[in-house]
Image (tube, grey):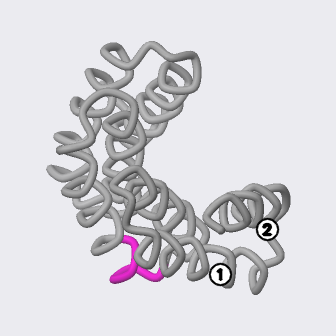
């Protein structure tokens, strides 16, 4: 017998670990498998998290795909009101626009991210986003 919610969570954590370690192919493989499971089970939070991670991976490997993944992540996370994860997705989308040299959109998404993080009193992330906003100037 499988405990699917636990498997989904574990795959995302492993996928995020691979991403952070720079093992993008392994990360993408884990997360794509996870997305199939989370969609089949209707676990929207995990789908939103997975799409965000795929967006982050795409920023390093294929920026053409990043926009789609961040848009999907934001759509899902906004609908379920998963604000901290939504703020992470906004920050990633801001970095996408920074890479595209669209400073106005980058600033918009990074600012939205920062506002959510500060309102939620999230630790660490607000400082990262503030540095990214400063770099836009």
Quarter holding the N terminus is: top left
- Give the alpha-carbon distance from disc 1 to disc 2, as whole Å: 8 Å
The answer to which quarter of the image holds residue 104 is bottom left
**Camera-nearest residue between 101 and 47:** 101
Secondary structure, magenta segment, majority class: helix
Q: Is residue 39 above or below residue 17?
A: below
Name the residue located 32 percent from the left edge and 32 percent from the top edge. 31
Give the magenta part as a residue range: 77-81
Name the residue located 26 percent from the left edge and 21 percent from the top edge. 29
Name the residue located 27 percent from the left edge and 41 percent from the top edge. 63
Q: Is there a contact, CB below 8 Å, between mark 1 and mark 2?
A: yes
Name the residue located 19 percent from the left edge and 44 percent from the top edge. 65
Name the element at disc 1. Answer: helix
Count the labels in the image: 2
Crowding at mark 1 (Cα within 10 Å: few <14, some 14-19, many 20+)? some
**Camera-nearest residue between 2 and 17:** 17
Residue picked out by circle 1: 116
Looking at the image, residue 129 sits to the left or right of residue 6; the answer is: right
Looking at the image, residue 60 sits to the left or right of residue 16; the answer is: left
The answer to which quarter of the image holds residue 137 is bottom right
x, y percentage for residue 112?
A: 56, 82
Q: Is residue 100 magenta?
A: no
Residue picked out by circle 2: 122
């Amino acid at each position: 017998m499988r405990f699917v919610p636990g498997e989904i969570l574990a795959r995302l954590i492993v996928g995020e670990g691979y991403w952070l370690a720079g093992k993008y192919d392994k990360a993408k493989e884990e997360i794509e498998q996870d997305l199939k499971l989370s969609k089949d089970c209707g676990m929207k939070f995990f789908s939103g998290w997975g799409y965000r991670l795929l967006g982050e991976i795409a920023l390093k490997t294929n920026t053409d795909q990043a926009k789609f993944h961040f848009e999907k992540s934001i759509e899902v996370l906004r609908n379920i009101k998963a604000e901290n994860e939504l703020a992470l997705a906004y920050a990633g989308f801001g970095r996408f626009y920074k890479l595209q040299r669209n400073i106005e959109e980058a600033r918009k998404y990074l600012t939205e991210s920062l506002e959510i993080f500060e309102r939620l009193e999230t630790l660490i992330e607000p400082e990262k986003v503030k540095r990214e906003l400063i770099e836009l100037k």
